[in-house]
Image (cartoon, rainbow, N blue to C red):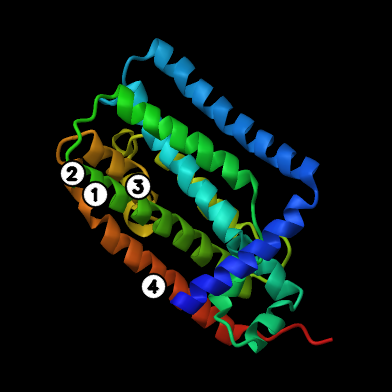
Amino acid sequence: MRRSLYLYRRLFGQQLKAILEYQADFLILLVAAALQQVLGFVFLRVVYGRIPDINGWGFWEIAFIYAMIFFTEGVGSLFFEGTWRIGRLVNMGELDRYLLRPVSPVLQIFTTGIGMNGLGNILLGLFIMIQSLVRAGVEWTPGKVAAGILLILSAVVIRVSINLAANCSGFWIKNAGNSFPLLIHNLSDFAKYPLTIFAPGLKVLISVFIPFAFVSFFPASYLFDKGGWKWIAFAAPAVAIYCAAVAYGVLRIGLKKYESVGN
């Protein structure tokens, strides 16, 4: 583990140096990401100007759910952008050199690229999360603080694991236009709102099969004390471990199927 963290830091650092060489591009990415998420937040504000609550959820409570999606997406993009490049690695045969090195392929895939737009998502997400928790009047205890941190860490693991598993479809769908990962990613839009407003089938989809609800809705239910839903949040660490194991298993199966590209 210590060696893996060291290698991750070094590989990430090299990618970061390459990106910062073009400072204008770096700044444009940050500003564009921030503007995109700000517009989404403004849309929420406009809706709640006319509707005081949705199924008992107030503006700042839903803002927290929204921000959790921003934040976890930002972490996945900034630190684990390589998951989105698996398709290219497979199609171009670039995965060959990863498999020849005495380093975990997962570690190398994670550091294949850096999505600097993720930094804007992280900062804006954190800002909205803090504002939501302050304005919603959450009553804090040491136990609730510890549980909140654990839920946020679990949410990040779940989000990254879903991204990794979805992009592993590139081992089977060998074309440049593989839209399956984007399809799975777009399902996270449903997790920007309370689970209670959706039909039963959709609830099962985003809480069991593709558990985006554990990224946003269930942590918010616990922190804002939303009835029976809040106790489901305590399953988040187990869900995170399960998602990570499934993603790693799918990657291993994909690597066994990998045949390079000839010459």
Q: Residues within 10 Å of mark 2 (few under 14, many from 20)?
A: few
Of the pair 52 and 206, the residue shown nearer to us:
52
The Cα atoms of the two marked residues, 3 and 2, are separated by: 25 Å
- Image quadrant where residue 81 sits: bottom right
The residue that disc 4 covers is 245
Circles 4, 3 touching at the beta carbon (< 8 Å): no
Measuring 23% from the left and 30% from the top, which residue is drawn there?
A: 138
Q: Nearer the viewer, mark 1 or mark 4?
A: 1
Among numbered discs 1 and 3, the one appearing first in the sequence: 1
The Cα atoms of the two marked residues, 4 and 3, are separated by: 18 Å
Kind of residue at badge 3: Ala
Answer yes or no: is residue 169 visible.
no
The residue that disc 2 covers is 142
* Quadrant of the snapshot with the C terminus: bottom right
Kind of residue at badge 2: Pro
Of the pair 62 and 120, the residue shown nearer to us:
120
Residue 214: where, in percent of width, then height? Answer: 33, 50
Kind of residue at badge 1: Ala
The residue that disc 3 covers is 213
Residue 211: where, in percent of width, then height? Answer: 37, 54
Secondary element at tag 4: helix
Left or right: residue 63 versus residue 258 is left
The Cα atoms of the two marked residues, 2 and 1, are separated by: 6 Å
The residue that disc 1 covers is 146
Residue 148: where, in percent of width, then height? Answer: 28, 45
The Cα atoms of the two marked residues, 1 and 4, are separated by: 24 Å
Circles 3, 2 touching at the beta carbon (< 8 Å): no
Q: Nearer the viewer, mark 3 or mark 2?
A: 2
Secondary element at tag 1: helix
